[in-house]
Amino acid sequence: MARYGTETTLPPRRVLHMARAFFGPSGEVGLDLTKDALSEIGFAGGGGGVEVSARPRPNDPRRTDVTILSREFDHFAERFLGILSDAESSPSVFTRIAQVFKRKTD
């Protein structure tokens, strides 16, 4: 079992939603959903599993602590960390919508 951890400015619910979209039955990895709680989500299949927890940092609620426990899916856990990093650095949906409307008014 491997444990991965990171922190992000993404909210916990978004991290868990992204984990479901990546690891879940209709996602890239296609694992079965085994746990779906407020601050963690779990998946299993193919002789292993993945659990992702996302909690606001106690001393800085604008940051989220993310922990991933992986059994036999380390490669995908590492890829998910990259996806989180990419999502954090890309503009939000609201920023992109504002940019579209700004272009139309120019």
Image (tube, grey):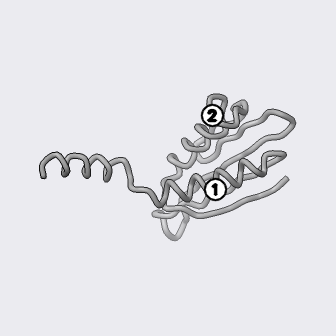
When the figure is inspected, residue 91 is found, relative to residue 7, above or below; the finding is above
Q: Which mark is residue 41?
A: none
- Inspect the image, locate mark 1, and give the three-letter code of the amino acid beneath it: Leu
Q: Position of residue 38 (x, y in %)?
A: 58, 43
- Inspect the image, locate mark 2, and give the three-letter code of the amino acid beneath it: Gly
Give me the residue at 31% from left, 53% from top.
Answer: 95
Q: Nearer the viewer, residue 67 or 47?
A: 47
Q: Neighbour class for label 2 at 10 Å: few (<14), some, many (≥20)?
A: few
When the figure is inspected, residue 100 is found, relative to residue 67, above or below; the finding is above
Q: Position of residue 100 (x, y in %)?
A: 25, 47
In this figure, which residue is indicated by the disc labeled 1?
A: 81
Question: How many callouts does the rendering have?
Answer: 2
Give me the residue at 84% from left, 45% from top.
Answer: 72
Q: Neighbour class for label 1 at 10 Å: few (<14), some, many (≥20)?
A: many
Could you tell whether 69 is left or right of 84 in the image?
A: right
Q: Quadrant of residue 58?
A: bottom right
Mark found first going from the N terminus, 2 or 1: 2
**Helix, strand or loop under label 1:** helix
Give me the residue at 72% from left, 46% from top.
Answer: 51
Q: Are marks 2 and 1 in contact (CB under 8 Å)?
A: no
Give me the residue at 36% from left, 47% from top.
Answer: 93
Q: Residue furthest left?
A: 105
Could you tell whether 23 is left or right of 10 in the image?
A: right
Could you tell whether 39 is left or right of 99 in the image?
A: right
Q: Nearer the viewer, residue 43 or 77?
A: 77
Q: Which mark is residue 27?
A: 2
What is the spatial separation of the Cα atoms under label 2 and label 1, in whole angstroms?
A: 15 Å
Q: Position of residue 52 (x, y in %)?
A: 67, 48
**Helix, strand or loop under label 2:** loop
Q: Position of residue 60 (x, y in %)?
A: 49, 68
Q: Quadrant of residue 24?
A: top right
